[in-house]
Image (cartoon, helix red, strand yellow):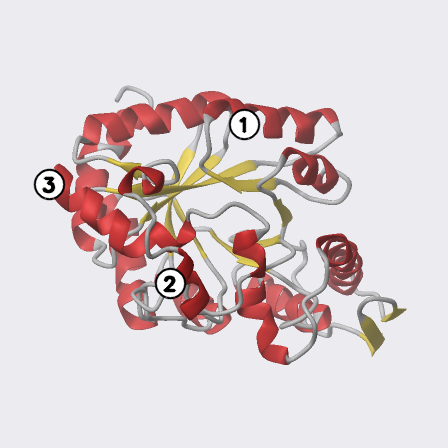
């Protein structure tokens, strides 16, 4: 049975308000939660960027839900530090935490002052990071000289069972590659045919573990309001790779998205005031075989969305609904 989670967007909402939102989401009937891990928002209009790992400790303590995070080790974060962060949360909250690993975006990673590598180099770097993180979580002492360097690292605080390391992908080729190493797959909403192709590529290549989907939604009591929310907050997020990977600042995103038409936003966000339509979209995703769907309401005010979906959407998606 598919579980339905709350996606906490650090780029859009301050950490205190986001903690209140995730507590409210659990009370409203959401099963799980996940969050982003950004240094920079996608637009000046979003205007936030709290530190995910500090927040996760508070959120796991304040709720009883399982949590995940989408992280990019290798440039902004050294993989040994990420292994330590994963290990500590796994030890404190056994069985409740997973981390998805991806190659990242320049908007977050350029801050170190290091060059932003080509995609093939970033992919190879991530693979090295995965091996380092797994070895550290297994209790090994790790030294490594490659695209990342590690000198005699060892984790002294580790969980009995290492948290799952999930592969983050938006393309069929990356989904197939993640099958080599990942304990599951996560992607974002896209046309059903594309999602089916990604799932098939991952499974046919031997991919194991649960399938996660992050779904961008915009809901308000009136259709015009739902459309306005999506356009204001998410029009800078409509660009396919490599553009979204390679732009460096919020100013870049805001300039290139200045003339994005509203219908383009509706291609990447499920926008509707009709809760029944949201039920239909989510049922389609569940039928594809996703084990967990995390709902990201792209507006900055979350309470109305949480209350409406908790009362009118989630019950209809569960057995007997």
Which mark is drawn over residue 120?
none
**Which residue is located at x 61 percent, y 64 percent?**
86
Foreground residue among 57 and 165:
165
- Residue furthest toward the front? 259
Disc 1 target residue: 194
Of marks 3 and 1, the one in the foreground = 1
**Number of residues whose C-alpha sits closer than 10 Å to that of mark 3, classed few (under 14), some (14–19) or many (20 or more):** some
Disc 2 target residue: 254
Horizontal and vertical percent for residue 234? Answer: 34, 52
**Separation of residues labelled 1 and 2 (CA atoms):** 28 Å
Q: Residue 318, relative to residue 32: is it above or below?
A: above
Q: Quadrant of the C terminus?
A: top left
Disc 3 target residue: 221
**Number of residues whose C-alpha sits closer than 10 Å to that of mark 2, classed few (under 14), some (14–19) or many (20 or more):** some
Q: On the picture, is 68 further left or further right than 33? A: right
Q: Quadrant of the N terminus?
A: top left
Dot 3 lies on which element?
loop
- Res. 84 visible in picture: yes
Foreground residue among 265 and 91:
265
């Amino acid at each position: 049975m598919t579980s339905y989670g709350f996606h906490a967007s650090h780029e859009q909402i301050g950490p205190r308000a986001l903690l209140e939102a995730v507590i409210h989401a659990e009370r409203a009937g959401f099963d799980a939660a996940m969050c982003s891990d950004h240094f920079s928002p996608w637009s000046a209009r979003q205007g936030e960027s709290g530190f995910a790992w500090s927040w996760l400790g508070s959120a796991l303590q304040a709720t009883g839900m399982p949590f995940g995070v989408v992280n990019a080790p290798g440039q902004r974060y050294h993989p040994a530090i990420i292994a330590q962060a994963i290990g500590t949360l796994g030890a404190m909250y056994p069985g409740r935490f997973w981390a998805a690993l991806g190659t990242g975006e320049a908007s977050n990673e350029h801050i170190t002052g290091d060059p932003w590598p080509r995609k093939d180099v970033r992919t190879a770097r991530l693979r090295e990071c995965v091996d380092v993180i797994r070895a550290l979580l297994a209790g090994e002492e790790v030294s490594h000289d490659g695209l990342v360097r590690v000198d005699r690292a060892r984790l002294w605080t580790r969980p009995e069972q290492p948290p799952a390391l999930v592969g983050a992908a938006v393309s069929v080729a990356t989904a197939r590659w993640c099958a080599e190493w990942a304990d599951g797959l996560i992607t974002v909403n896209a046309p059903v045919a594309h999602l089916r192709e990604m799932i098939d590529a991952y499974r046919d290549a031997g991919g194991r573990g649960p399938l996660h989907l992050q779904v961008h939604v915009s809901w308000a009591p009136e259709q015009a309001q739902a459309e306005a929310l999506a356009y204001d907050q998410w029009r800078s997020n409509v660009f396919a790779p490599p553009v979204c990977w390679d732009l460096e600042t919020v100013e870049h995103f805001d300039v290139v998205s200045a003339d994005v038409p509203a219908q383009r936003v509706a291609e990447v966000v499920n926008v509707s005031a009709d809760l029944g339509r949201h039920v239909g979209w989510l049922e389609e995703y569940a039928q594809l075989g996703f084990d967990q769907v995390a709902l990201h309401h792209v507006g900055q005010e979350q309470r109305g969305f949480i209350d409406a979906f908790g009362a009118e959407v989630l019950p209809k998606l569960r057995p007997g609904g």
